[in-house]
Image (cartoon, grey):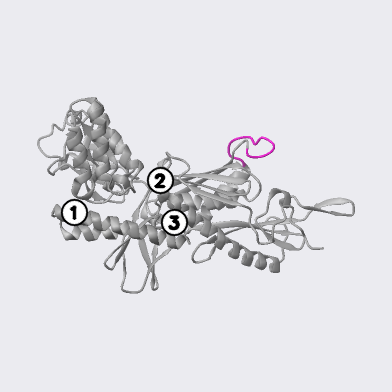
Amino acid sequence: MAYKRPDKREYDELRKIQAKVGVIKRADGSAMFAFGNSKAIVAVYGPRKLHPQHLQDPEKCLLRCYYDLASFSVTERKRPGPSRRSTEVSYVTANALKSVIDLERFPSSVIDVYIIIIEADASTRCAGINAASMALAHAGIPMKELVSSVSIGKIGDAIVADLSKAEEDYTIKKDGKEIKSATDIPLAFLSRSEKISLMQLDGKATAKDLKEAMALGKKVCKKITETQKKALKKIKDE
Amino acid sequence: MEKEIKKKTKLKKEEKKTEKEEKKEEIKKGTEEKEIKIERKKREIVVPGEVVATGTEFLPSEGTTRDGKDILATRFGLLEKAAKLVKVIPLSGVFIPRIGNTVIGQINDISFNGWMIGIRAPKDAFLSVADCAGYINKKDLSEHYGIKDMIITKIKSIKSRGIDLTMKERGLRKLEGGMTIEINPTRVPRIIGRAGSMVNTIKTETGCSIVVGQNGIIWIKGKNVEDELLAKKAIDLIVEKPFIEGLTDKVKEFLQKQKSKK
């Protein structure tokens, strides 16, 4: 039986994307990016002076990412403040963005990236990376290229793009027990060189599945890159 | 369809341009300036990683890099091609200091041989007593520049540990009285205008003396606060709408209107 997506999307179809630049006035650069109901807003500050001083690197700039869910973003109130999960996501986000930024240009300073998820419906880290990449460009930071991210999932036997919360929680019944059978693979690609800067795996997947997921991710990330570019270029009309 | 409309609007713009150019010629402006103006209107917005030019005859300048045959943008901003040189003019971002920039700074701290000065840069800026003109009593440096004083200064050198400033040049001094406002440093060229036309317009219309620092700090001093606020309003107008054509004339109009209201 072929898997049917709950919102009747095609396997490679993304949810409705919203992208906007300059949403936070006082920040040096800011952006909003949304996959359907997963919405992230990002503020970028810097390059600015780094405190505490012992973190300063005389050779390069530090990229500090701060990812968090707003307390009202999920169905059950999320206790505000950093958690085990948000610390991990902040770390992988910083690593996904680091490779495109020219950090050697600003020694012993810091670039702060604040990612707040104001509405969560799965693939929030991907929405966060997309918004952060746009906000960094908007802050006038020298970058080699943009970063686009999408989560690829394996549900049953189908490889699908951009999972929603309903799909992430997909279960099958086996011997009277409910078994979680969705695999989530967040991927991030660089816009020009198409290199991978983020790959995580939550669930089970074979080598063949992973290859398929990467091919699909590369294909849909191109679409995301186009939306990001469009949003950035729109700034002049305002 | 869209392309056609664009073409039409472009044509219209060009017509307007020629009209303006004719007017300019009447006022006997240099032909060089005209060429630059035409070049300016062709600018488009580019994003990092975008191919802005192909071929070995082009040379990458600020905000661009070479990748094989292609020239890529490394910053978000307006693309400008002047002859063979390709560069990107930033639209946003913080102040990135360069040697020779004239900036306005605030005294943050006093040490035994100089002052620490905040110039909105990612690094500390230091003004040494040796880089000041005239006699300075080394026993009490606060007599010369006290904490929270604003000064107009120049960047002498940029080293890994920080920025060194100098006061040994004409026009560099302590700013007394008046008010300072902060704008985005990328808007500074707009505030100054071509050969200072914009800032001179504001100066003559409001009667204020204005100093614009490259770091986006502007110092205004007029006969009274009303004049200063009017100049501030004009600057806010430029910051909000930097892409409008013929902005200098609009600012002049705005200032005259505000003055006649009184």
Residue B211 x %, y %? 21, 39
| Chain of the residue where label 2 is placed in the rendered structure | A
Residue B104: quadrant of the picture: top left
Q: Nearer the viewer, residue B93 or B124?
A: B93
Q: Count neighbours of disc 1 (C-alpha within 10 A) and say few if under 14, some if 14 to 19, many if 20 or more.
A: some
| Chain of the residue where label 1 is placed in the rendered structure | B
Q: What's the amino acid at mark 2?
A: Gly
Cα–Cα span, label 2 and label 3: 13 Å
Cα–Cα span, label 1 and label 3: 44 Å
Q: Mark 2 vs mark 3: same chain? A: yes
| Chain of the residue where label 3 is placed in the rendered structure | A
Residue B13: quadrant of the picture: bottom left
Q: Is residue A109 visible?
A: yes
Cα–Cα span, label 1 and label 2: 41 Å
Helix, strand or loop status at disc 2: strand
Residue B18, compared with residue B212, is above or below; it is below
Q: Nearer the viewer, residue B37 or B57?
A: B37
Q: Which residue is mark 1?
A: B24
> Is residue A77 a member of the stretch shown in magenta?
yes
* Residue farthest toward the right in the current orientation of the protein: A175
Residue B256, compared with residue B42, is above or below; it is above
- Specify whether B133 is left or right of A65: left
Helix, strand or loop status at disc 3: loop
Q: Which residue is mark 2?
A: A46
Helix, strand or loop status at disc 1: helix
